[in-house]
Amino acid sequence: MLKAVLFDLDGVITDTAKFHFLAWRDLGAELGVTVDEAFNEELKGVSRIDSLERILVFGGLADKYSTAEKEALCTKKNDHYLELIQEMTPADILPGILPLLEELREAGLKAIVTSASKNAPGILELLQVKDYFDGIVDPASVAAGKPAPDIFLAGAELAGAKPAECIGVEDAASGVEAIKAAHIPAIAIGDAEVLAQADRVLADTSDLSLAVLRDTWEKATANG
């Protein structure tokens, strides 16, 4: 029986990608690296430190900074990002998500946030949806980030469910890979070609519903 839904945050509940892009672009400019929208696609679903490492490699600066300096750069980027997202309101919730959260609550299914973002609790507060979630996995508490399965396994545990009793919702290929590595059925939002590893790909969050989640989970577990 399906017991829990594990949600990524960026690109699923809300779209903070634009704020991340602006913050990385500005930091890149300070470092002399041009972070354009095309390169930014490679940073989606990737942790903060891994994103910085990719930018440094891209700019030929891989060996220029110490671990402490890299941590300082990550903090600087995040502080700027936090300033930018203070403008967020419930109007920034993606289409279909609020009705879905209400359906899950009525059906007694657990909703867990499994995001690489350390800012998830604050963002959910700004969106005024934090009460709909039964837990938020602290990304700092898992050994390895996506595409490793750790955060989704932790999400299942937080929900008090087995991985096979959960379904994950993602918008990034690394996230889908992580869900599947955890032996959890996956629904992806976005490009069907990029996200082909998912059990079902939807073009938009407005296509999400409890019926779609259950149907996808049942078919995936029947085949599994």
Image (cartoon, rainbow, N blue to C red):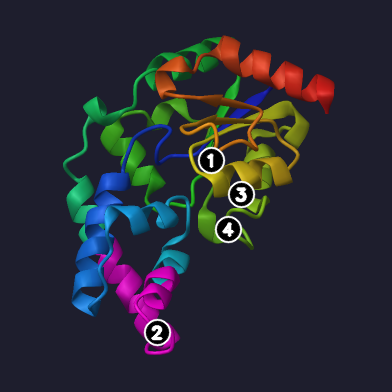
- Residue 59 belongs to magenta span: yes
At 31% from the left and 28% from the top, the residue drawn is 93
Residue at mark 1 to residue at mark 4: CA–CA distance = 20 Å
- Give above or below for 202 relative to 120: above
The answer to whether the residues at label 4 and label 3 have Cβ atoms under 8 Å apart is: yes
Residue at mark 4 to residue at mark 3: CA–CA distance = 7 Å
Residue type for callout 3: Ile
Q: Earlier in the sequence, mark 1 or mark 2?
A: 2
Residue at mark 3 to residue at mark 2: CA–CA distance = 25 Å
Residue 214: which quarter of the image? top right
At 50% from the left and 43% from the top, the residue drawn is 172
Q: Is residue 162 visible?
A: no
Q: Earlier in the sequence, mark 3 or mark 1?
A: 3
Q: Which residue is mark 4?
A: 145
Residue type for callout 2: Ala
Q: Which residue is mark 2?
A: 68
**Which element is circle 1 on?**
loop
Q: Position of residue 138 (x, y in %)?
A: 52, 52
The answer to whether the residues at label 3 and label 1 have Cβ atoms under 8 Å apart is: no
Q: Is residue 161 visible?
A: yes
Q: Which one is nearer the viewer's eye here, 137 or 14?
A: 14
Residue at mark 1 to residue at mark 2: CA–CA distance = 35 Å
Residues in magenta, as a range: 53-79
Count residues near mark 3 (Cα–Cα under 10 Å), then give few for <14, some for 14-19, many for 20+.
many
**Is residue 60 toward the left or the right of residue 83 in the image?**
right
Residue at mark 2 to residue at mark 4: CA–CA distance = 20 Å
Q: Which residue is mark 1?
A: 194
- Residue 61 belongs to magenta span: yes
